Amino acid sequence: MRDTVTRCYRVYGIVQGVGFRPTVSRHAKKCAVTGSVSNKGPYVEIFVQGTLENVDSFRTLLEKEPPKRAVILKINEIPVKEPVVFTDFGIIESKKTKGEIFISPDIAICDDCKKEMYDPKDRRYLHPFINCTCCGPRLTILDTLPYDRERTSMKEFPMCEKCAEEYHSPATRRYDAQPVCCNECGPEVYLIGRSEHGRRAITYTRRVIKKGGIAAIKGIGGFHLCCNAENPEAVALLRERKKRPMKPFAVMARNIDAVKKECLVTPEQESILTGHQKPILLLDRKSGGRISENTAPENPKLGVMLPYAPLQLLLFDYDDGITMPDCLIMTSANTSGAPICRDDEDAVRELSKLCDCMLSHNRLIRIRADDTVMDFYKNRPYMIRRSRGYAPLPVPLSMNFKGQVFAAGGELKNEFCIGINDLFYMSPYIGDLEDIRTVEAFKETSKRFLTLLEAEPEIAACDMHPMYNSVEVVKSASLKTLEIQHHYAHVLSCMAENDYSQRVIGVSFDGTGYGTDKTIWGGEILFSDYEGFERSAYIKPFLQPGGDLSAKEGWRIAASMILSLSENEEEVWAAVRKLDLCSDAEFNVIKAMTEKNINTVKSTSCGRLFDAVSAILGIRKRSTFEGEAACALQYKAMEYKGAEAVPSYILEEDNAIILPTHDLVYDIVKKRLAGENISYLAWYFHKSLSEMAVSACLKIREKTGVNVCALTGGVFQNTLLLSMTDDALTDKGFTVLTHSLIPPNDGGIALGQAAAAMYRLNRK
Ligand code: ZN
Ligand code: ZN
Ligand code: FE
């Protein structure tokens, strides 16, 4: 015994329902250590005994090769005072108790299952619902806890004898896999409103797509609308029926080779594309691809994903002799504003007129999950929409928080968050709460999440905006509420994602949010920590004539800014006409509105400033979808290849620094009128704005000594502005926090709200 050591590890994370204990047991045998593994509430406990060398190599192996789908958040080593002697390594069966389960996100079909599905000799040959311990739906089929088949959508499908055998045997790939099923006992696909089901339904759908039609297809987290991405007429038809003229559609490609024919793929991107979460990745398009230009018009990027549900693979490859295209449009099926359709009733009501057939199945979707959308920044994922495959993976903080909180998130791109001690669970994407149907989805999903996580929040955090539906819902629940200013929540979200809790200079460049002075904010530099914030700097306020309309029509803001371009009215009129911003009549209306302050709000919105400049440069005067004008401006700027310095200054007022964006706009108007190149000017705008932010950060550092900046807010989805600002700050010696797996946009603010609420709860 003298040379024997005994260690006890507690492993936290997604460690249940993913084959954790069998893997641990295999590792132990490999390393010649004895001991045991058991589920202990929120963690798995492992005892290992052996020589120091063997015990160390076990630990290394556990960290290097955890069970495929496990997510290890942390491993704590617990001192062992009086070790018992273990003669072998055992899996200890334990009862599931309250609070025990970390809910796993849905997992894309694994290679083993794929192989079986296409093996004519396998009993799950072409089974559209094949899954195993390593793959399959999780969150989306969960009803209540504890997580076992009886409490999932699979309860209606009793296991056949063979499936039950696999389910109960630790030696099989399907040990403890709740959704396990086969052709005998599993769910079935069928066409809504037609008699075809099973094989015939799949073939019928493939034929519709092949012929240029549109199919609605029920997937893991909701329905998609699908058509041949390589057929311009089919894509045009979908645009026409969906009344969606410009917004890019996502594409599902047959395999990674098909992706590489259309787009540039780095090794890091490839590993995400082919990984088990299968988000939509925004990739740079190559020329000469086969995908219709109309899939993402005037856009250098394309949103691409690979099939993640067995049924999606069957759309590409089936044994019915039909050859399918390599790339299909796969866009969330919903009417504008409404949440993604998840059952037949939704589909019939909302999709009948949009598609030529509807392929559904009888496994219920309990929780909707849209596809996750991800960009890349400096070779790392940069989240745009965090949903399927990622929700509800918790964000861990190391603050030793205790308690439970709920955070409602923002009004647009809503995702809510539940904090339990140091873990923060973000919901899947809910959508825009301006639509009452989405508000219903918000209520239902948040209720279900609270049940699943067995959470009873003590505080609910929300935005400050008096008109937000999310705020109303929170306030109507009888809970203590905490209002968090929108852009401060963005900063907190970035801090939380980086597990950083000291003071930061938070650059929150965003669309719009309600400020503490009741005006619209959105271009803020907030000196922040968990205690609160100081508004250290902001974009020079401008007017947004036309209220909500101005968010879609950048020319309105441009026109109102140009009103003060010069004292000389003739010069102003000449500029508006030459820029072709609007008609004379329209300009007169804007003039009257701003002079008389009719339906006009004061704003520091950075997003709206991008819209205005986009209009001034003649790139987009209005947007058909959120962010269109700003994205087009970014793409235009990316065409410029220079990197010269630009003049930049900031203004210091009594209590704050002002970013003189008005002057920048006038400068750009004059240069444009003088015939300067558009892509240069687009770049010049990005560069100057970034320089202003950097100058302000330098000034704040001078005053406070704080050397850490956080870059957050929807505008920082713009990776050109992000890299300019990030690089310049880094150059000046700042530590820069950026987002990665939490969106910089409003989809991420619930995390900041939740962290703030948890902080309040723990500050005593
Ligand atoms: Zn599998
Ligand atoms: Zn079966
Ligand atoms: Fe925002």
Image (tube, grey):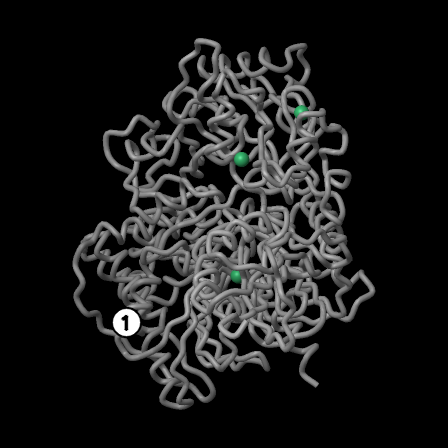
- On screen, residue 641 versus residue 496, left or right, reads left
In the image, residue 88 sits, relative to residue 248, either above or below, namely below
In the image, residue 620 sits, relative to residue 598, either above or below, namely above
Q: Quadrant of residue 152?
A: top right
Image quadrant in which the C terminus is located: bottom right
Image quadrant in which the N terminus is located: bottom right
Direction right: furthest residue? 478
- On screen, residue 294 versus residue 437, left or right, reads left
- Give the tally of numbered discs: 1
**x, y percent for residue 112:** 48, 32
Mark 1 residue element: helix
In-front residue for pair 581/743: 743
In-front residue for pair 594/153: 153
**x, y percent for residue 385:** 51, 50
In the image, residue 582 sits, relative to residue 302, either above or below, namely below
Is residue 186 visible in the rendered image? The answer is no
**x, y percent for residue 129:** 60, 28
Residue drawn at point x = 38 percent, y = 85 percent: 701
Using a 10 Å C-alpha cutoff, classify the residue at mark 1 as few (fewer than 14 neighbours), some (14 to 19) or many (20 or more): some
Direction front: furthest residue? 1
In-front residue for pair 250/1: 1
Residue drawn at point x = 52 percent, y = 78 percent: 501
Name the kind of residue labelled 1 in the image: Ala
Residue drawn at point x = 74 percent, y = 43 percent: 143
Whether the residue under disc 1 has CB within 8 Å of ligand 3: no
Residue drawn at point x = 41 percent, y = 66 percent: 738
- Residue at mark 1: 728
Q: Quadrant of residue 184?
A: top right
**x, y percent for residue 398:** 56, 73
Q: Quadrant of residue 752?
A: bottom right
Is residue 28 visible in the rendered image? The answer is yes
